[in-house]
Image (cartoon, rainbow, N blue to C red):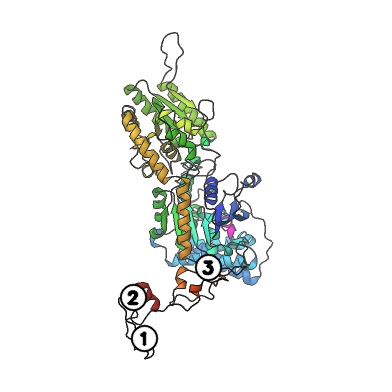
Amino acid sequence: MRIGLLTEGGYPYVSGDAGLWCDRLVRGLGQHEFEVYALSRSERQEAAGQVALPPHVTRVRTAPLWTAEGDGVVHGRRARRRFTEHYGALVSVLCEGAPADVRTDRSSPQADRFSNALYGLAELARDEGGLVGALRSEGAVRALERACRAPGAVGAAREARVPDLLAVAGHLEHALRPLSLDWYEDDGDDGLGSVDLCHAASGGAAALPGLLARHFFGVPLLVTEYGVRLRTHYLAGAGAGAGAGAGARGAGSGGGAAVSAGAASPSGAASGPAHGPSQGPVQVPVPEGAPAVRSLLAAFHGRLAAEVYRQAACVTSGNAHARRWQERCGADRAKLRTVHPGMDASRFAEVGDSPDAADPRALVWVGRVEPAKDLVSLLHAFAEIRKEEPGTRLRIFGASAGAEGEAYLGHCRMLAAQLFPDEAAGPHSVGDNPVSFEEIGGPEVPGLAEAYAAGAVVVLSSVVEGFPAGLVEAMFCGRATVSTDVGAVVEVIGGTGLVVPPRNPRALAEACVALLRDPARRARLGAAARARALELFTVEQNTAAFHGIYLEVVSRSPVRRGVLDAAGEPRPFAVPAEAWLPGRWTGLGGRAVPRYPSAWTAGPPVRGTAAARGSVAAPASSAPRTTAAAPAPAVATEGAR
């Protein structure tokens, strides 16, 4: 089948979000044809270039989301009236505020008004050649002002001042730029109308072209969110309202004007630079601190996410933690699937298969040094461990990210020096600190596998975590683990490791001491962890899961287009499977007829017998009498009806 892969700020560019995951997905499904529709996030990203693409990627179409030049479209009076009507209807829904319960708001009048206004703007952009100028016009700001002053607007919207109106109008113009793209032209094989399935690699702007493809052409939409974008916006708004600047940072996101999406990128970038090229944070503009701006933008993103979830044929997440957020943000539970991120297990195979030769008295921590990893609690826990096991060492592998990470790393070094003064075996020997801060890539530890193999127990001390990629890598290496109960840790580790509450150094120390004193238990947990990781978190299981979802979605939601290609051969999935059975659902304009049909397909279709229909018909005198020995199958009865 032909898949339209929709990305924002990532694949096929060298830098960006979830690029490694998308590349593995595309390469792992070589039996399908892919078309990539990418929204770039910055000029720097475009200048860095694109990754090498496999041959079954037949088309790549890109559009800049970071800028929008004037389209030069001059709208006539009728087009301006249509724009004012649809844009006014959209912002009026926003001024009524976000729904109290998104799960019960899927079929409300406000949800229908929002979707009608959104698709009305899309149809206008398609007819007129773009909406960039109209969305930037004074008329858009005036329509927003009228909606804020209208009866029924929430109190925060009524308090909006001119700077607030300009900020909201600018954000809406940025968010609605995908409406003006030329990806929705109805001209054969050029555009999203030619694909069998749209797969959005994230919510938000990446899913908006998929919404329009479904609206214009009936193409089914699959949405994958390893970090829930609506939750990201809520955290950004909360951080801005509290004066937090960039807001809370978590795994899978950080730096700049970005916040945690609650789930790490499936590429493993959450564990730091040691995991390969960084995939970068989810750059979501932080809303201004004005209550009116936060209220209107929260309503917009909430309505857009609800519409995406409502129209999507299937919504996937990387773990149950993100899945619960999707359901809370309006996704239908029947559409939700959990597909764990796929990670490359081959580079850890040698360590996992070899006998455990690690130092039995060493603890290992691997990751990116930042406040969310809570190394302070780990150092205090290690102080308790040293009281029980004096010869234990703690090896911290990782590098800092950004100025905040550098400051936090310096603070951790000072704390380690205070808690553990250099120890010397005698008066004439050089002291040694039991805590070491090391970087991966040197002669002793050339790679990640060697870092995990350096200790008997791997520790995760985070207070915020999405999908713990570093924990999965430790499981690939067959190491026993002690982790804090955050994010998807319990879902990932199962029963193959010890889990303690976050910010509890005493509990963390007790769990580590228990494993250090019991080598047999460490071996059992490590073997079970490796078996679990190889079963659930490999690239192969990820691509196989998406292959099955592709077939399921397309079989249930076939695109009704020409059933024959240019060579006269039937297009796969152009006709649903049930269309080959007689019945009232077979109202297709054409039937796929192969040029060389099989002999058994030459006759007329088999109809249900009279006995199967439940009635007795008198047979013709010249025809032999037949008697049904058993009731006909249910499918034949349904076909006869």
Locate residue 389 relative to residue 199 in the image: left or right.
left
Quarter containing the C terminus: bottom left
Q: Which residue is label 3 attached to?
A: 574
User: What whole-number distance in Å separates the C-alpha atoms at marks 1 and 3?
Assistant: 41 Å
Q: Residue 204 in the image: state x and y as whole percent.
A: 51, 55
Q: Quadrant of residue 4?
A: bottom right
Classify mark 3: helix, strand or loop. Answer: loop
Q: Helix, strand or loop at disc 1?
A: loop
**Would you name the residue on which mark 1 appears?**
624
Q: Position of residue 324 (x, y in %)?
A: 39, 52
Q: In the rendered image of this protein, does residue 199 appear above or below residue 409?
A: below
Residues tagged 2 and 1 counted as in contact (Cβ below 8 A): no
Element type where label 2 sits in the image: loop
Q: Where does the magenta region start and end?
A: 172-178
On the rendered image, what quadrant is the N terminus found in? Answer: bottom right
Is residue 173 in the magenta section?
yes
Nearer to us of marks 1 and 3 is 1
Q: Which mark is residue 632?
A: 2
Disc 2 marks which amino acid? Ala
- Nearest to viewer (mark 2 / mark 1): 1
Residue 313 appears in view:
no
- x and y percent of residue 274 in the render? 52, 35
